[in-house]
Image (cartoon, rainbow, N blue to C red):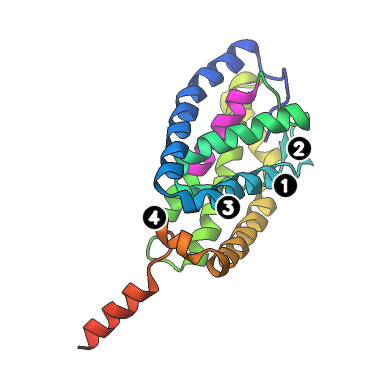
């Protein structure tokens, strides 16, 4: 999904940077708020960023000028809400551009909108819509949708920049090429997300409870007892 350095026309690159900027600024404020109000969640916050970095660094060849890979942003969106991922995801993209030549500085705004903004919001939206479903189902769907939404956005960006045959034809062409690798990757990412959250339930349940990801079992038992009474 990382659009390569210099691949977008300068006007498109600049426009996506302007669009991404307010989301990143808002994300920085959200991160400061999380650190101030829930200091015990700082380790989880770092883990969410590291998870995104590792997952999105695994790239496969795909559309010329881009690549396919998991995104990892759905996990952070579930734990900390999407605004936080706007900053974490952009920092990940910046480091990958500087250290791994994965993506680029001129395309950072476009990549941030796709992976750090649209993906997390789409995944989190599905997570909330499935509020009554088991946690594993919610996590799987959120992770997979965050992944796929990122690639739909990248396809849109590429079709806007290179609309050979018209925007819709170009959009369908980019989506079709991405789909070969991205749909299986989204399923795998959903499964990995479920495994990670299950592990966090064992290692960091108090932090997850403070973040509202899981309920308080003590409170639940009290409610059941009250109902029986």
Compared with 104, 224 (above or below) is: below
Q: Earlier in the sequence, mark 3 or mark 2?
A: 2
Q: Is residue 189 magenta?
A: no
Q: Quadrant of residue 212?
A: bottom left
Compared with 27, 198 (above or below) is: below
The residue singled out by tag 1 in the image is: 181
The residue singled out by tag 2 in the image is: 62
Q: Earlier in the sequence, mark 1 or mark 4?
A: 4
Q: Which residues are magenta?
A: 107-120
Secondary structure state at the residue bearing disc 1: helix
Marks 2/1 in contact by CB < 8 Å: the verdict is yes
The residue singled out by tag 3 in the image is: 144
Q: Quadrant of residue 5?
A: top right
Marks 3/4 in contact by CB < 8 Å: the verdict is no
Compared with 8, 29 (above or below) is: below
* Image depth: mark 3 or mark 2 in front: 3
Q: Earlier in the sequence, mark 4 or mark 2?
A: 2
Q: Give the image location of residue 182, x and y in percent.
A: 68, 46
Q: Predominant secondary structure in magenta?
A: helix
The residue singled out by tag 4 in the image is: 129
Q: Earlier in the sequence, mark 3 or mark 1?
A: 3
* Image depth: mark 4 or mark 2 in front: 4
* Image depth: mark 3 or mark 1 in front: 3
In this view, which residue lies farthest toward the left? 229
Secondary structure state at the residue bearing disc 4: helix
């Amino acid at each position: 999904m990382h659009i390569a350095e210099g691949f977008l026309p300068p006007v498109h690159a600049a426009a996506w940077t302007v669009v991404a900027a307010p989301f990143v600024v808002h994300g920085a404020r959200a991160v400061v708020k999380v650190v101030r109000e829930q200091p015990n969640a700082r380790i989880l916050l770092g883990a969410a960023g590291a998870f995104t970095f590792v997952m999105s660094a695994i790239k496969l060849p795909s559309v010329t000028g881009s690549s396919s890979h998991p995104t990892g942003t759905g996990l952070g969106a579930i734990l900390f809400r999407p605004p936080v991922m706007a900053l974490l995801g952009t920092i990940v993209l910046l480091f990958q551009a500087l250290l791994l030549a994965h993506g680029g500085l001129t395309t950072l705004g476009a990549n941030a909108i796709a992976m750090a903004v649209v993906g997390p919001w789409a995944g989190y939206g599905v997570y909330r819509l499935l509020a009554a479903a088991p946690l594993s189902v919610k996590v799987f769907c959120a992770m997979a949708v965050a992944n796929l939404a990122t690639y739909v956005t990248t396809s849109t960006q590429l079709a806007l920049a290179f609309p050979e045959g018209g925007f819709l034809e170009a959009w369908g062409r980019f989506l079709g090429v991405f789909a070969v690798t991205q749909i299986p990757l989204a399923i795998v990412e959903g499964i990995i997300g479920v495994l990670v959250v299950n592990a966090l339930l064992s290692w960091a349940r108090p932090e997850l409870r403070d973040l509202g990801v899981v309920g308080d079992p003590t409170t639940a038992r009290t409610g059941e007892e009250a109902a029986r009474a």
